[in-house]
Image: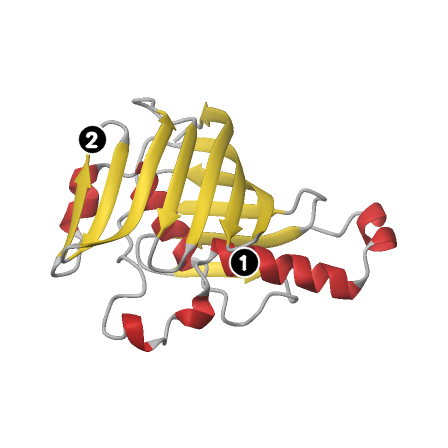
Amino acid sequence: MLLSAGFVRYCSEFVLRQFILFLFCAFLSSCSRLKQPEIAGLPTMLPLAAPMAPARRVLQQITASWQDRQDTLLCVLELDARRIAMAGLSPDGLSLFNLSYDGTTVNADKSPLLPETVAPAFIIADVQLIYWPLAELRKILPFEWRLEANEQHRSLYYKQQKKVEVNYLSPDAVWPKAVELINYQYNYRLHIKTLSYGALSE
């Protein structure tokens, strides 16, 4: 997607770089921290589960918060039994990333301004932790990890330490409309609001 004329006119390249860097440092769980000693030996993310039917398209507003910063982006998510596809846009219409996952490989098309350390698979892992059936997630948990859940919460543990918490602020059997994810391992928080949800033909 091309930058809108208004965005190019009013934003310098420096501001654009800072916006994207701050957004992805939060949203992709501060990838630069992955080699710190306190998490050495731990999986940096959960293995990815298989794509999941039914086919649907979801438009979401995601607000990422960490430390004293906060940014918002729009995501278009398409799901079916063969693939997961996601496009991320800034509020100004700037294309931040496009990614897809076919159950084996993650393919990503990122803005050239994004840091090389950005790992799109982190986005898919968070989406699956929130929305995938518990039975599917538990099948792929690494050794000594466990997932506890009820209708309003999910908590992911390594041994006795909670790593991620999911709070369903607006529970729904089909697709929760408002969700909060707190990642204690990488110190970020996501507020996800579903703006639209629709079925797609198979």
- Disc 2 to disc 1, how far (Cα)? 30 Å
Label 2 sits on a secondary structure element that is: loop
- Give neighbour class at mark 2: few <14, some 14-19, many 20+ (Cα, 10 Å): few
For this rendering, which residue is in front, 18 or 102? Answer: 18
> Which residue lies at the image location 31% right of the left edge and 34% below the top edge?
53
Q: Which mark is residue 24?
A: 1
- Horizontal arrangement in the rendering, residue 187 relative to residue 42 (left or right): right
Kind of residue at badge 1: Phe
For this rendering, which residue is in front, 181 or 58? Answer: 181
Instruction: Give the mark, 2 or 1, whose residue is nearer the N terminus.
Output: 1
Q: Position of residue 161 (x, y in %)?
A: 20, 56
> Which residue lies at the image location 49% right of the left edge and 71% below the top edge?
117
According to the picture, the residue beneath numbered tag 2 turns out to be 150
Q: Position of residue 144 (x, y in %)?
A: 12, 59
Residue situated furthest right in the rendering: 9
Label 1 sits on a secondary structure element that is: helix
Kind of residue at badge 2: Asn
> Which residue lies at the image location 40% right of the left edge and 46% below the top edge?
84
Q: Is residue 17 above or below residue 180?
A: below
Q: Position of residue 180 (x, y in %)?
A: 40, 38
